[in-house]
Image (spheres, coloured by chain):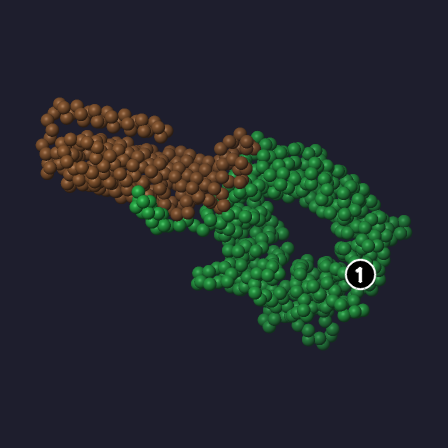
Chain colours: A brown, B green
Amino acid sequence: MKSAVAIALAVFLAAGSAAAEEETQDQPEAPSTAGLGSLQRFSQVSLSLRSQWVPNAGYDPFAKTDYLAAWSFAGSRTFWVKDRFSLAVGLGIDLGASSSEARGQKTALGAHRFTVPIEARYHITPWLYAFGKVAPGPLFMTASIKDGSAGDQSLSDSGFVFAADASLGAAFLFTSRSNPERHPPRFWATGEWGYGWTTSRDWQFSPSDQDKVTGRVASANLGEVAFRGTFFRLGAALSF
Amino acid sequence: MKRILVLACLAAAACGERPEAWDAPVTSITAVGLEGSLALVDDGAHRVVVARPTADLELLRTSVTVGKGVVNVKASADQKRLFVLSTGDVPKKKQDDQGPSLTVVDDGGQVSRRIELPTPLSGLALDPAGRWAVIFPGGDGRAFVENPNQLVFVDLTAAPEKAVTFRTLRSFGGRPQRLTFTPELTLPGGKRHLLVVETDQDVSILDLEHVQDTPERPEITVRLSNGLSTRSLKPAGVVADDGEVSKSDDARIAVRIADDSNVFMLTLAPNPAGSTAPNDFTPLVNLADVGGIASDITFLRTDGGLRLAALVPQTKQAVLVEPGTSVTTAVDLPAAYQRVSLVTDQVAPGGTGDVALLYGSTTSVAFWALGRTSGQPYRSVEVVNIAGGAAQVSSLPAPNQDLKVLSSSGTGFYVLNLKSRTASPLTTLQTARVVPSADGLRLWAFGPGTTNLAQIPVSNLAPLPLPLERPIRDVFDLKRTDGGRALLALDTRGTTGVTVLDAEAPDLRTARSFFGLLQEGL
């Protein structure tokens, strides 16, 4: 799953980059705005740590606190520029995980977002831009409980819900700011704060191998879970 | 990167924590079968999970909050209510710390009463008639200082503010060991239920009709001594009998002694004329030496009248005591039986004398007829041989009340037919527990801690093996919500699982298996 998304991301960025190259060759460069040159127009890949508060009872079995950490991987490409404004679209993956104990039984959870971030940027200076972002997409959740009542099996559940993030943030260029008309690799520090939302779903845990169970399996219902809450994300990005 | 990690850690630390129950491991589960539900006492989460089986073998699960620190759990005699005694927070250090309480949960999974108690105690005795719960020190050493003679009476029919009554027994140095509620007795003051408290050296009698009186009506304490030494005698069990229905001066309580050959007979007679005694009856004490330590006693009716029967394994005898005169008649028995149970209603209803079943860890059981046979009073003892003894005897309810299950710690058990006086053996590969169903139609046998389970219809005693994939700690044959019956096999590994079968037509293919029950509803 992860590799498929990575390939899609790479193809998307390569296509975006090629299109941008063609655009640069076929059309004259847009006039420079406040010394930005064509700095607004770039492809970007990023790696961040996402920290989310999930104050939801359905998350309690999998963490002692409401905190859910995730590694975020994203790629985007600017597709529209107007003065200091630009719009970019991309693909994002948040790989969230937590493990804990619930009633003395080991638990583990994965909450993975696959989103299409649409980002509006305002370039304040050549080395700083602010952005607002919405990122809809599916969230895949998977969880297991190593509960003794299932013997040597685990109780597990997995499924998809719809997810959407809305966030505000800023990116700070901390490498060379020269040659704004060109696109050498540049490194950015990024930070954003926002709200992550998902639809809800009932946890229904059942043994992984149901053939070993006598008769019909009745799932353990651990209530409704929704990964909703404030988050922030800190990371680094490479533009080119 | 370090800064990011530090920020992440700070964020985690700032997050809200989950409810404490998630951090409480499920260590020991008390499971109690009610009429139509299985109650799982989850002390770590301060709750009782009530699971009611449905026609589709689903379990309707509800969770009710009970006090912290559960120390005693009992079901009422009719299996319709569960009593959960909790100590609360001990000691109470904060304003919002919980006090001790008694929570009554009904069969449907609702809290029907919650009574705050003044002091944390761990002993609980329930009135079979359903009116009283008596809470007493259980001797578990929880409190730094404890008055062992303190009793808390809870009137389950009274409003909460009037339900609790404190009583402290006058003590001559004894500590309560066992509490027994008598059936209704016709006493000089009218029909009464009594509470008999056995301490380690005497017996106290409380009139439950007047336990809430002000000024307090004191209990009657009978000190137990054989008159030959100053040694105190330790009671080992009591039985009560109302005597003749038309008489109010012949109700009796008999007490057997743990380490003495005497049995005590207390006749609850009217007070002497002019007496100012606060109680309206007085016990007249008689002793009878039965020739050895009695292992069990019961009142029974012979064609010579009421007698107290005492089993004396030492001498392989049953001794009949005439209650008025304490004259004894010894009857030789073929074996050293230890327990006696009346089976007259099943064997010879309307006869001139009772019939008693004698059993114990011997290789036979015996039917003892208390009528006159061939001029030999009380000598009619019919023996049914069994192997392995009958340490436990379980009764089946109607319509098969004439059957009893005799089980021992060995492999196998017997189904004793009281009418035909036959004992059908059923062998097991390992030590088994046998549980009769509440509708009297079947038995369930299982190996505790194993996956072995079998249903035995009492109509043909043909075992139907139903091996499960999980170890069974206990089984419960319960009434379903549609009126049918379900068998719940309990597995207490992890956070508890249950396998539910149709008790009337069990089929592993249609069974339903539940897991992680105590992870739910938190």
* Residue A72 quadrant: top left
* Residue A202 quadrant: top left
Q: Is residue A143 above or below residue B281?
A: above
**Where's residue B79, x and y in %?**
60, 49
Q: How many marks?
A: 1
Front in this rendered view, residue B19 or A42: A42
The crowd level at tag 1 (other Cα within 10 Å; few <14, some 14-19, many 20+) is some
Name the residue type under label 1: Ser
**Where's residue B105, x and y in %?**
54, 52
Residue most toward the right? B375
Residue B318 in view (yes/no): no
Image quadrant where one finds the N terminus of chain A: top left
Front in this rendered view, residue B23 or B40: B23
Residue at 41% across, 47% down:
A64
Left or right, residue B346 beside residue B146: right
Q: Which residue is mark 1?
A: B261
Residue at 54% across, 48% down:
B27
Q: Is residue B428 above or below residue B311?
A: above
Residue at 9% across, 32% down:
A31
Left or right, residue B386 beside residue B35: right
**Where's residue B142, x and y in %?**
57, 61
Residue at 83% across, 59% down:
B291
Q: Is residue B325 above or below residue A49?
A: below
Residue B507 in view (yes/no): yes
